[in-house]
């Protein structure tokens, strides 16, 4: 199936750099979390426009979908927070891409990497299906027919539980901070 869009696809690495530049100071972004966010940007673009946001390949990583160019660019960070001085200067994307990135980051970045992995590797999702059939590649058509296209951000996640506890027991947590 050929997917067309009025805008030329943006390199996935540029999307990743924009996420780091715009949101790296707000969220704890590891290489894995960044790759998962880039994947969900692709899904969001397909939902919104029917066209991919980027043309780079998505592959079956060890734990979830990754974009090899993005993974390699940030591999040296390991489990540490991804930060690069030049990325803080990254130019904004086009308006549609910025809206997609903002939406995905707003919905998915507050989740822990464990929450994102659970979401991204669900049994009916594209990663699990490709992994089960022994395929290393995840194509646009695979994403379009996967449950990921209909999947909502779950409300019962570790991140939501921590937020609930913080909100419900704010005074108790403040006392614990000082003890």
Image (tube, rainbow, N blue to C red):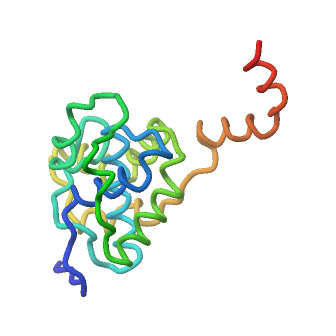
> Residue 154 in the image: x percent, y percent?
57, 51
Is 162 drawn above or below residue 37 in the view shown? above
- Residue 51's place in the image compared with 111, above or below, is below
84 relative to 99, above or below: above
Q: Which of the 4 image quarters holds residue 75?
A: top left
Residue 83 location, x and y as percent? Answer: 32, 40
The total of numbered circles placed on residues is 0
Q: Is residue 61 left or right of residue 46?
A: left
Residue occupying image coordinates x 20% and y 31%: 76
Of 2 and 130, nearer the camera is 2
Q: Quadrant of the N terminus?
A: bottom left
**Residue placed most toward the observer, 35 or 120:** 35
At a point 38% along the width and 52% down the height, the residue shown is: 37
User: Viewed as shown, does residue 65 lie left or right of 169?
Assistant: left
Q: Left or right: 31 with respect to 108?
A: left
Residue at (73% x, 35% y) in the render: 166
Position in image of residue 110 (x %, y %) = 54, 47
Residue 131: quarter of image: top left
Point 45% across, 44% down: residue: 116
Identify which residue, 72 or 121, lies in the foreground. Answer: 72
């Amino acid at each position: 199936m050929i997917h067309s869009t009025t805008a030329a696809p943006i390199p996935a690495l540029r999307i990743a750099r924009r996420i780091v530049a715009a949101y790296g100071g707000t969220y704890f972004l590891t290489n894995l979390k960044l790759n998962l966010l880039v994947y969900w940007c692709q899904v969001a673009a397909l939902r919104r426009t029917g066209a991919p946001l980027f043309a780079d390949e998505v592959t079956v990583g060890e734990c979830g979908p990754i974009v090899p160019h993005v993974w390699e660019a940030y591999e040296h960070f390991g489990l540490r927070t991804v930060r690069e001085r030049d990325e803080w200067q990254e130019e904004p994307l086009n308006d549609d891409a910025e809206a997609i990135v903002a939406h995905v980051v707003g919905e998915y970045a507050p989740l822990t990497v464990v929450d994102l992995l659970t979401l991204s590797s669900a049994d009916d999702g594209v990663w699990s299906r490709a992994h089960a059939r022994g395929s290393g590649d995840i194509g646009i058509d695979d994403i379009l027919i996967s449950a990921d296209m209909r999947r909502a951000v779950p409300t019962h996640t570790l991140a939501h539980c921590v937020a609930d506890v913080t909100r419900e027991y704010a005074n108790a947590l403040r006392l614990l901070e000082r003890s």
